[in-house]
Amino acid sequence: DAGVIQSPRHEVTEMGQEVTLRCKPISGHDYLFWYRQTMMRGLELLIYFNNNVPIDDSGMPEDRFSAKMPNASFSTLKIQPSEPRDSAVYFCASSLTGLGSYNEQFFGPGTRLTVL
Amino acid sequence: GDSVTQMEGPVTLSEEAFLTINCTYTATGYPSLFWYVQYPGEGLQLLLKATKADDKGSNKGFEATYRKETTSFHLEKGSVQVSDSAVYFCALSDYTGRRALTFGSGTRLQVQP
């Protein structure tokens, strides 16, 4: 398997623009997570899905952020409008329920977002 | 709520030195514990895990023991290499509810030749 795939790897945009980050989880995994990593706040969970349904979005910072998972192999995280404080590395991770999985999460390489 | 506390970094060691990175946790129930490693420019990778008290996780010369009495999961390696330079994250998964991992703040390790 190719692992978790994220695109783009780097995104530079101007304040006020819409940004869409994409993630393809590992095939067969039923959980998908979006995290944000910054120097100040470390790794924060934004939202996670189970079987394409959002379960916990309490980490989404504000209404400018939205996430969707239209099918088992694709998820998006959208920021509209973007602000400089949204600059961070955004990670997608997936995991598989089941005995022995111990909730091990597999991370993508991340998208480095810079908002000017 | 759940929380993970790691020692502040950066940790700078010479090659072949002994490594300890402290991690303590607070959680309801009986969490599973993990160490993840992040190499420069990459995503996180699972390094090792332990799912119950007194379990020892080990991988690539690293090991950590799940100590319920001290709520700790310290990471150790007997002899570090330059290639071990990375950021190490302690994390827990609490099965009583939330499926997401709770991460510590990360500890940067720099190994000098």
Image: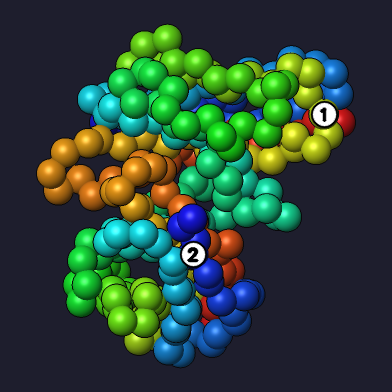
Query: Where B31 falls versus A7 (above or below)?
Result: below
A68 sits left or right of A116 in the view: left
Q: Position of residue B21 (x, y in %)?
A: 47, 78
> Secondary structure beneath disc 1?
loop
Q: Quadrant of residue B36?
A: bottom left
Residue A83 — which label? 1
| Chain containing the residue with disc 2 | B
Query: Where A39 falls versus A48 (above or below)?
Result: below
Q: Amino acid at mark 2?
A: Val
Q: Quadrant of the N terminus of chain A?
A: top left
Query: Where A19 falls versus B82 (above or below)?
Result: above
Q: Considering depth in this image, is B47 or B90 the residue closer to the camera?
A: B90
Q: Contact, CB < 8 Å: mark 2 with mark 1? A: no
Q: Position of residue B69 (x, y in %)?
A: 31, 81
Mark 2 or 1, closer to the camera: 2
A34 sits left or right of A51 in the view: right
Can the viewer see residue B4?
yes
Q: Residue at x 13, y 44 (%)?
A: A99
B6 sits left or right of B100 in the view: right
The residue furthest top is A70
> Secondary structure beneath disc 2?
strand
Cα separation, mark 2 vs mark 1, equals 29 Å
Q: Residue at x 47, y 79 (%)?
A: B22
Query: Where A112 falls versus A75 (above or below)?
Result: below
Q: Quadrant of the C terminus of chain A?
A: top right
Can the viewer see residue B47?
no
Residue of label 2: B4
Q: Amino acid at mark 1?
A: Glu
